[in-house]
Image (tube, helix red, strand yellow):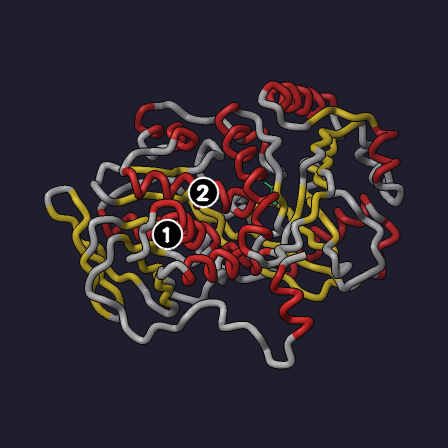
Amino acid sequence: MPLRLIKFALSKEYPEPRMFRERDRLKSSYDAVIIGAGGHGLAAAYYLARDYGMNNIVVLERGYIGGGNTGRNTTIIRSNYLTPEGVKFYDESVRLWQDLSQDFDLNLFYSTRGHFTLAHTDASLRTMRWRAEVNKHYGVGSEVVGSEDIQKACPYMDMTCNGHAPILGALYHAPGSIARHDAVAWGYGRGADMRGVEIHQKTEVTGITIKSGRVTEVQTNRGNISTSKVLCAVAGFTPRILEMVGLRSPLYIHPLQAMVSEPMKAWLDPIIVSGSLHVYVSQTARGELVMGASLDPYELHSTRSTLDFVEGLAARMLDLFPFLSNAKVVRQWAGMADMTPDFAPIMGKTTIEGFYLDSGWGTWGFKATPVCGKTMAYTVANDRNHELIKDFSLSRFADYELVGEKGAASVGH
Ligand code: PYC
């Protein structure tokens, strides 16, 4: 049991300091500036301070910590990818996730549930077999299972999907998990703050100065900062920051919506994904169903939610779980997914010295949080791409060396 829980139980006073210190002023210089206080930016700050002793670091956030995609996803964690690059990368992330509550001394509600990706056609079964073989080759637990196994794990599912999309089998991934998303941002934020990192909310980057091909200064709405290292970890805002440094990327931004039901008795243990129905769903420890679907089908820089989305997703949920017809949706939200053409991220050094990118997270960024933090911290500290991210560089698009990960996306996008 985390020691902090015992402290809470025995103390009459509230025994905790704030998660991180509010700083009233920016310094004029830092060893590194991290743009974006989401999970990725905070994780990089945490590992830079913890593993490389770099603590003269500032994390700048135009909104509030964890208020972007970290707080706007459906918290699914898995490593059943299709490419060797993807499988190795996300497998390391899952390993890190498993120790994170202990690392932080904070309960992230990390819960391993098993993850079924349903196949409704022979073609999707074929892709599942392919993924299972790649996964097994790299030691990741994945196997193709038949409809009886699925029905056993999820007895309330209509295996015919209302008669129009019978389930033939699934890719089963035992390590599939969920976690409490805001706790992840708070855990990394608190850990970074404890090690001297400064976190400044409501601080917007307005410009970045490059001289002789290297980063020299970051301008903000609260003053200018001289620095030689900048890490950009801002998901849907990446194109805006790239414009400031004169870099181009093939990123395109789509809203990704999700919704949550009222709490109900626990009935769904595994995570269920159907690419053909465009549905993914899990049940939290509080009993809510967290549900998502595909990207909105047009480029848009917005986190607005739509009734259309609720209607569409509810109809598909009812195909799978008809008994939910009276369940209430209590909340919906959207994130901004920074999509790449090959569905793999863009990470690492760039052609500008001292400017590093952690982007292209599309619909799969939450699960990558710990490994992004680790590998970006290594990359920034050593000015050398970490081995696990060397295939994810921005230059791969110019060099035609894509990492085709579309077959492992949760749902069709
Ligand atoms: O990649 O597992 C995933 C995912 C779940 C929801 C959106 N993407």
CA–CA distance in space, label 2 to label 1:
15 Å
Name the element at disc 1.
helix
Left or right: residue 102 compared with residue 167:
left
Q: Position of residue 351 (x, y in %)?
A: 23, 36
Outermost bottom residue: 13
Point out the tag, 2 or 1, that comes first from the N-terminus: 1
Q: In the rendered view, tell whether residue 374 sits above or below residue 26.
A: above
Question: Which of the labelled discs sits on residue 352, or is there none?
Answer: none
Q: Is residue 288 or residue 158 the one in the foreground?
A: 288
Question: Which of the labelled discs sits on residue 49, or is there none?
Answer: 1
The residue at 71%/66% (across/down) is 330
Q: In the rendered view, tell whether residue 214 sits above or below residue 72.
A: above
Q: In the rendered view, tell whether residue 11 sits above or below residue 154.
A: below
Position of the N terminus by quadrant: bottom right
The residue at 46%/53% (across/down) is 300
- The amino acid type found where label 2 is placed reads Cys
Left or right: residue 87 compared with residue 22:
right
Residue 189 seen anywhere in this rendered image of the structure: yes
Mark 2 or 1: in front is: 1
- The amino acid type found where label 1 is placed reads Ala
Residue 234 seen anywhere in this rendered image of the structure: no
Q: Position of residue 235 (x, y in %)?
A: 43, 50
Q: Position of residue 215 (x, y in %)?
A: 19, 48
Q: Which residue is mark 2?
A: 372
Left or right: residue 345 compared with residue 277:
left
Disc 1: CA contacts within 10 A as few (<14), some (14-19) or many (>=20): many
Is label 2's Cβ within 8 Å of ligand 1?
A: no
